[in-house]
Image (tube, helix red, strand yellow):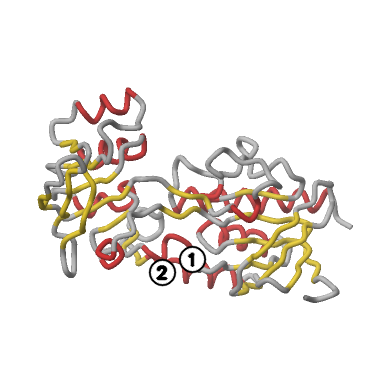
Amino acid sequence: MSDSPERIKCLIIGSGPAGYTAAIYAARADLKPVLITGMEMGGQLTTTTEVENYPGYPEGIQGPEMMEEFKKQAERFGTDIRIAYVSKTELSTEKGGWHKITVNDNEIIEAQAVIIATGASAKYLGLDSEKRLMGHGVSACAVCDGFFFKGQETIIVGGGDSACEEASYLSKLCPKVTMLVRGDEMRASKIMQERVEKKENIEILYNTETVEVLGEGTVTGARVRNRKTGEEMDIPAQGFFVAIGHKPNTDIFKGQIDMDKVGYIKAVPGTSKTNLPGVFATGDAQDKHYRQAVTAAGSGCMGALDAEKYLAEHAE
């Protein structure tokens, strides 16, 4: 481990839309940002095929290609992008203090401002068939990908509020939505349950788990099992959506920064500021409601602007 840490003004952790947007703004403000990509460069969009709901791409764009364009734009303004991961953080509680970040287990960077853009990871069922068909009918975001299944039958797995919201969204586009709930009741709020129960084109199957997602090149359906009777059946569908929650990638900050019980970082409403001076939270690491590329990018901009102001006030 180096005896003399590298000292910089602004460190950005994460390389999704929030991280790269923060880098673009920070670099243009001459903060000379260093961006640590993390192990999943580009974030969740690298697992997405067609992106059609991001402004500026009227014909749509592939998720990985879009993230590569974000990266090039950040580099154009001088961002130092490093393919590495953060293994430890020691965040200062003092205004103008230095935040100590360990990279790749043995390199230490001290930064006056840290912009957290580590995102969140969707939870999946862990089936081989699910992984194989990811981006080819399997998705964890109905709002992102539901449009591609307009006029087709879909399946959604989950019994919480998010699953109900996504089922309701899909019901406006699809002739039939089958909702698979593992237990004998939903975890969703009463009002959300009533909303999906009233939809004529949503069929709810309780005590039902997925055995396999069916299809070769694309999804053609799912094999499911009744957890009480053991009976299996195949449900035809062209889209298979998993809505069993997300996990924010914030474990390395636990015990140092204010979070909710799930692990989403708490930011001061209307800002990216956290309870720690010089630490700013952006993107899905602090957003459990919208989780869209465009909202993540917007919060990345906020993080850079907040960091710029903070550094101006606490310059050495």
| Percent of width and height locating residue 256 | 71, 47
Q: Residue furthest front?
A: 229
Measured along the vertical axis of the image, is residue 163 above or below residue 75?
above
| Residue positioned most to the right | 316
- Decide: few, some or many residues near mark 2? Use Cα within 10 Å; few <14, some 14-19, many ≥20: many
Residue in the picture at 83% in, 47% down: 95
Residue 307 x/y as whole percent: 71, 52
Helix, strand or loop at label 1? It is: loop
Q: Amino acid at mark 1?
A: Gly
Query: Of 83 and 105, which appears nearest the observer?
Result: 105
Q: Taking 61 as reference, is 22 left or right?
A: right
Tell me residue 299's x, y (percent). 56, 48
Which residue is painted at 41% across and 53% down in the image? 122
* Measured Cα–Cα span from mark 1 to mark 2: 7 Å
The residue labelled by disc 1 is: 42
Indicate the quadrant where residue 78 lies: bottom right
- Residue 268 location (% of width, % of height): 65, 37
Helix, strand or loop at mark 2:
helix
Kind of residue indicated by mark 2: Pro
In the image, taking residue 274 as reference, residue 249 lies left or right, namely left
Q: Nearer the viewer, residue 139 or 213?
A: 213
Residue 64 - label:
2
Lower position in the chain sequence, tag 1 or tag 2: 1
**What residue is shown at x 32% (from left), y 23% (from top)?**
191
Left/right of residue 30 with respect to residue 127 in the rendered view? right
| Image quarter of the N terminus | bottom right
Left or right position of 183 against 153: right
Q: How many marks?
A: 2
Q: Are marks 1 and 2 in contact (CB under 8 Å)?
A: yes
> Which labelled disc corresponds to residue 228?
none
Residue in front for this viewpoint, 34 or 186? 186
